[in-house]
Amino acid sequence: MPESPRVTLRRHPERARYDWETIEAILDEALICHLGVVVDGEPLVLPTGFGRVGDTLYLHGAVTNRSLAAALEGVCITVTHVDGLVLARSAFSHSMNFRSVVVRGRARAVTDPVERLAGLRAVVEHFIPGRWAEVREPSPKELQTTIVIAVDLTECSAKVRSGPPLDPASDRKLAVWAGEVPLRLVAGPPRPDSDLLEGIDSPPSVDAVLRRFPDTTPGA
């Protein structure tokens, strides 16, 4: 990705990643992003679902959604994965292992019907691949009450930290446990809706979620 001063890392620049492969992987693994905008002169950051088609992010909401409207004037989107806790020998040196992406720019309202539907599909398929083909598509009335915005990935960067604590040499002789505690997301057993028609088994999309976030603890 072309580097931009607005997304260039200054704190720990050695953790910066500007290559498309890293940015793409971090975005695609995330289930939500945080949308940062200014509404009525005040900063507002909200968690929201998103989808990606190529180098464009799509977000959607009600037509009265003020945060999406504000994104048309300027937006900052962030995604973060916490991969582990990093325990050091001093309180000062504690950290986390993480992967994050920051996207800045100005959103555009998607008005083309074909792109609008593609954007909505991308949002659904982003967190449950294969689900769009299993369900009813949006009705004309639902589409009328929904706004879809697009943010091009022309100004973004990633930041990645991994590895053990970075204790100074003077602390490494302390009798204090130090190391990493890995963290990961796991899926629990599906819970069918109470009104589910008889004879309906979990679809391939749900089975895929279980494979994507397996619970590997003993007895699971």
Image (cartoon, helix red, strand yellow):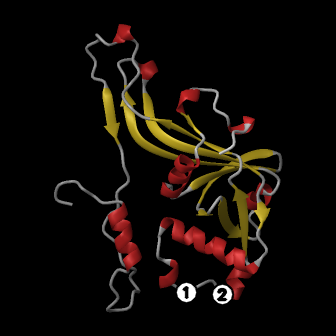
Say if 4 sits above or below 209 in the image.
above
Q: Amino acid at mark 1?
A: Arg
From the viewer's side, name the closer residue of 214 and 188. 214
Q: Quadrant of residue 14?
A: top right
Say if 58 sits above or below 144 in the image.
above
Q: Residue drawn 60% across and 63% down?
A: 52
Residue 186 falls left or right of residue 74? left
Secondary structure beneath dot 1 equals loop
Q: Amino acid at mark 2?
A: Ser
Q: Residue furthest top?
A: 170
**Split into 4 quadrants, where in the image is the N terminus?**
top right
Q: Residue drawn 71% across and 46% down?
A: 155
Residue 29 falls left or right of residue 39? left
Q: Residue drawn 67% across and 34% down?
A: 8
Q: Residue drawn 38% across and 25% down?
A: 165
From the viewer's side, name the closer residue of 33 and 190. 33
Q: Give the spatial CA distance, label 1 vs label 2.
A: 8 Å
Q: Which mark is residue 119?
A: none
Q: Residue beneath label 2, please?
A: 139
**Split into 4 quadrants, where in the image is the C terminus?**
bottom left
Secondary structure beneath dot 2 equals loop
From the viewer's side, name the closer residue of 33 and 193. 33
Instruction: Point out residue 194 in the picture as x, y percentages from the top left corner.
Output: 38, 82
Q: Residue beneath label 1, please?
A: 136
Categorize mark 1 by other alpha carbons within 10 Å: few (<14), some (14-19), many (20+): few
